Amino acid sequence: MLTITVGEGAVYGVLPYTSLWLQSVQHLSPIGAGLVVLPHAAAAGLVAVLSGRWMPRPSPRLGATLGLLLAGLGVATEGFLGPGSGWPALIGGLALSGIGMGLVFQVAAALALGSVPPERAGMAGGAYSTFEQLGYAFGVAVFGTLAVSTMNRSLNGVVPGPESAAQTLAGGGADTLLAATPAGERTAFGHTLHSVFATAHNTLALTAGTLAITGGAVVLWLTRHRPHPPQSAVADSPAKPAAAVQVDG
């Protein structure tokens, strides 16, 4: 359950703000933003299906560790946006994190359902879904707070009321802030908002990548092979011959 919680929190806790960057800063439509994220979903689904066929009994040490490592590297790759970056800068990281999460999904689900008797599969599935949603909810909350905090620091001294402006920007309100700006200053302020959102997104992505990679290292350590304690020597004793049984005729 640690694997799915960390993976969901790290990767999908950042994804809503990636979508907001695509729509409010890059001005893509919701469908366009969805198409940009499609490589992640396609990679995750394809890897989950193929790995399920290749590894019917997944190894938590291999699958979970590798999955979190790839997911962490992928989401961290998304953390190098600049003011002039466009949506193509995200494709490679989204695809790589999708490959990692595909492994995480397959391993976590298989281990959750395979660790209980068949009659308790429903209970195991419910526990899996609970930890999955818990990781996602926790990730969105934590990274949302981090996004507002980062934007607040970047906007401090640039606009009056930076905290309110940061909350508006983090909620996808870049156009609202531009509309309230004098016409002659909108172009320059638009570049500022691009830079502020890119900086915040980079902070989220690099933090999430570090979290996922650290989670993979923890899983690797928890699943290490521990030496078995030496068993006490059993004294060899000569076998006693079985007593003969006489049957009276």
Image: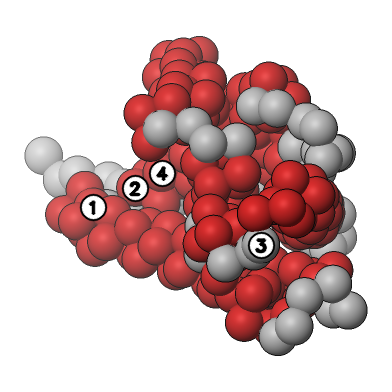
Q: Mark 2 is on which residue type?
A: Leu
Q: Is residue 119 left or right of residue 170?
A: left
The residue under label 3 is 182
Q: Secondary structure at mark 3?
A: loop
Q: Nearer the viewer, residue 176 or 104?
A: 176
Label 2 close to label 4 by CB (< 8 Å): yes
- Which quarter of the figure has residue 52? top left
The residue under label 1 is 121
Label 2 close to label 1 by CB (< 8 Å): yes
Q: Nearer the viewer, mark 3 or mark 4?
A: 3
Q: Nearer the viewer, mark 1 or mark 3?
A: 3
Residue 53 location (% of width, % of height): 43, 15
Is 45 drawn above or below residue 111 in the view shown?
Answer: above
Label 1 close to label 4 by CB (< 8 Å): no
The residues tagged by marks 3 and 4 sit, at their Cα atoms, a distance apart of 54 Å
- N-term mark: 2 or 1: 2
Which residue occupies 61% across, 44% down? 25
* Quarter of the C terminus within the rendering: top left
Q: Nearer the viewer, residue 212 or 223?
A: 212
The residue under label 2 is 113
